[in-house]
């Protein structure tokens, strides 16, 4: 047993809240349903690996079920490799050997089994055609860097200048000294959190929000303070800035993490007035804003918005803008950046040495080449994604007439209201049909959003159609759904 096994545990009451509404409608097969829910929590990261789970009697009391139910559930999870136990010491979560993707190729793999349909990740499956040319050219650029040590805490000047030029073109004058290159957007988020928040500090987040950001907040030991996204006519959600202002004044968070461009997962887009108000709020309350703009280049229904920093914070250390090469160019290009004041960039660079020693030089050179063609590449991506979004919306209307999907003006995914709180159960059922989903609660706190499901429109059309056929079968297999009546058909392709 290692040190982490002893230190990481979850109490019975906290576990019960995390499980949410896991019971089948008919109240039968409780042990199987409980095992399915715990396995889902482990696989999608809501229950971290190497976490000690409550004892059988404690969990049975918290869930108001028999100890036999919990004991049977734990036996099932041990057999499935989700739990490992040591007599007299307890049981810990682990990743089962048969996790989808561990023994079969990814659906995005160029070779091997394509039997998995990945609707859990909002990522483009194929790189931009420009990537190969940029990679070939970058190999020649690489020679000039081989005489040095290769450690660049700030990032290569060529890429910092290219990113700065892009910000300037989008409406916020930027110098290379205001840009720090990171190993992807997630690394940027974690670095910013490390600089600005400590254990126990409050971090304001939208609710729902990007799950990996929630994980980063938790990893830092900070506490996420959720501010609900309000309803909007197109289903995407909207910001209640009066509520957000009140929470900042009442809670005094150390910082706020926000996604104003095609918010993940709702797809909402913050308008000019809202962006100006955010900057004013940050200035008046001295609350730093981590502004995630990784989807900003993927506007489908109109021109892109100006960066939040363009609304009076071009040189302010209170606005840290996160960007990424992965959403437009390719997910495997692990290059991101932070734009802020030059002083804040220097502060982040000094801190970075304790996290890593810089991003890979060759990948930075590739990204710098691609940034020169970002307008052409993003225009092509937008055309592909607009067609894919509209196709998915049409197919969902046919196959699931009671579902209410959003119609986002950009980004990579829909936020779907399932009309029933069954998101986690559907996610478990869909896995049996080789369809991977991201359940709504993955994007929230304390089991929220069981009525919602995020659905990316990034699969190739033929694979999306097949995935939806399988999803219809999984949906109809849930306990609450019987065979379709003659007057209520479920259309499949």
Image: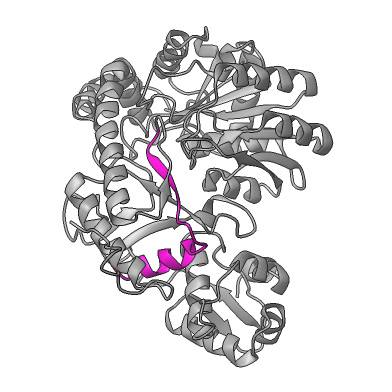
Image vertical order of residue 10 relative to residue 210, above or below: below
Look at 25% across and 27% down and name the residue there.
383
Q: Position of residue 350 (x, y in %)?
A: 63, 27
Q: How many marks?
A: 0
Q: Position of residue 43 (x, y in %)?
A: 46, 64
Depth order, front residue of 155/336:
336
Q: Quadrant of residue 399?
A: bottom left
Instruction: Tell me: 396 left or right of 443.
Output: left
Q: Nearer the viewer, residue 413 or 126?
A: 413
| Residue 9 x %, y % | 67, 69
Horizontal side, residue 224 vs residue 128: left or right: right
Going by the picture, which residue comes out furthest to the front? 487
Residue at the bottom extreme, as displayed: 68
Q: Residue at x 61, y 21 (%)?
A: 274
Q: Is the C terminus in the top left, top right, bottom left or bottom right quadrant?
A: bottom left
Q: Is residue 418 magenta?
A: yes
Residue 4 x, y percent position in the rendering: 63, 66
Q: Is residue 171 visible?
A: yes
* Nearer to me, 149 or 328: 328
Question: Which region of the structure is painted magenta?
Answer: 411-433
**Is residue 424 highlighted in magenta?**
yes
Q: Residue shown at 62%/35% (left/top)?
A: 257
Image quadrant where one finds the N terminus: bottom right
Q: As drawn, is 134 to the left or to the right of 425? A: left
């Amino acid at each position: 047993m290692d040190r982490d096994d002893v230190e990481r545990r979850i109490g019975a009451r906290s576990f019960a809240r995390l499980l949410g509404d896991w019971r089948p409608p008919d109240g039968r097969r409780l042990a199987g349903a409980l095992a399915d829910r715990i396995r889902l929590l482990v696989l999608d990261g809501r229950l971290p690996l190497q976490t000690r789970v409550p004892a059988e009697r404690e969990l049975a009391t918290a869930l108001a079920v028999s100890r036999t139910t919990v004991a049977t559930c734990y036996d099932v999870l041990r057999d499935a490799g989700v739990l490992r136990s040591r007599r007299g010491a307890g049981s810990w979560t682990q990743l089962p050997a048969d996790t989808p993707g561990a023994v079969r190729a990814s659906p995005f793999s160029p070779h091997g089994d394509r039997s998995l349909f990945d609707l859990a990740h909002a990522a483009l499956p194929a790189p931009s055609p420009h990537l190969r040319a940029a990679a070939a050219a970058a190999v020649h650029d690489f020679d000039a860097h081989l005489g040095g040590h290769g450690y660049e805490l700030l990032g290569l000047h060529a890429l910092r200048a290219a990113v700065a030029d892009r910000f300037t073109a989008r409406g916020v004058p930027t110098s290379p000294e205001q840009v720090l290159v990171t190993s992807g957007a997630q690394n940027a988020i974690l670095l910013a959190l490390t600089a600005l928040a400590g254990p126990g500090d409050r971090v304001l987040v939208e609710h729902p929000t990007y799950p990996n950001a929630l994980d980063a907040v938790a990893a830092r030991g900070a506490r996420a303070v959720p501010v609900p996204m309000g309803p909007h006519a197109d289903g995407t959600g909207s910001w209640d800035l009066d509520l957000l202002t009140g929470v900042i004044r009442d809670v005094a968070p150390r910082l706020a993490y926000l996604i104003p461009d095609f918010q993940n997962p709702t797809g909402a887009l913050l308008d000019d007035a809202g962006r100006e108000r955010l900057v004013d709020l940050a200035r008046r309350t001295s609350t730093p804003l981590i502004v995630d703009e990784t989807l900003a280049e993927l506007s489908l229904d109109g021109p892109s918005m100006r960066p939040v920093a363009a609304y009076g914070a071009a040189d302010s250390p209170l606005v840290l803008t996160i960007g990424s090469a992965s959403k437009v160019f390719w997910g495997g290009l692990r290059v991101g950046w932070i734009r802020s004041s030059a002083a804040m960039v220097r502060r982040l660079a000094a801190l970075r040495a304790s996290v890593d020693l810089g991003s890979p030089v060759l990948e930075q050179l590739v990204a710098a080449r691609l940034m020169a063609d970002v307008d052409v590449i993003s225009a092509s991506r937008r055309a592909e994604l607009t067609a894919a979004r509209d196709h998915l919306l049409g197919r969902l209307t046919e196959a699931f007439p009671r579902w209410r999907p959003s119609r986002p003006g950009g980004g990579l995914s829909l936020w779907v209201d399932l009309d029933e709180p069954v998101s986690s159960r559907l996610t478990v059922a869909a896995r049996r049909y080789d369809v991977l989903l991201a359940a709504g609660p993955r994007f929230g706190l304390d089991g929220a959003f069981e009525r919602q499901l995020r659905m990316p429109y990034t699969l190739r059309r033929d694979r999306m159609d097949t995935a939806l056929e399988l999803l219809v079968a999984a949906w109809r297999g849930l306990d609450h759904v019987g065979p379709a009546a003659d007057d209520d058909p479920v259309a499949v392709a």
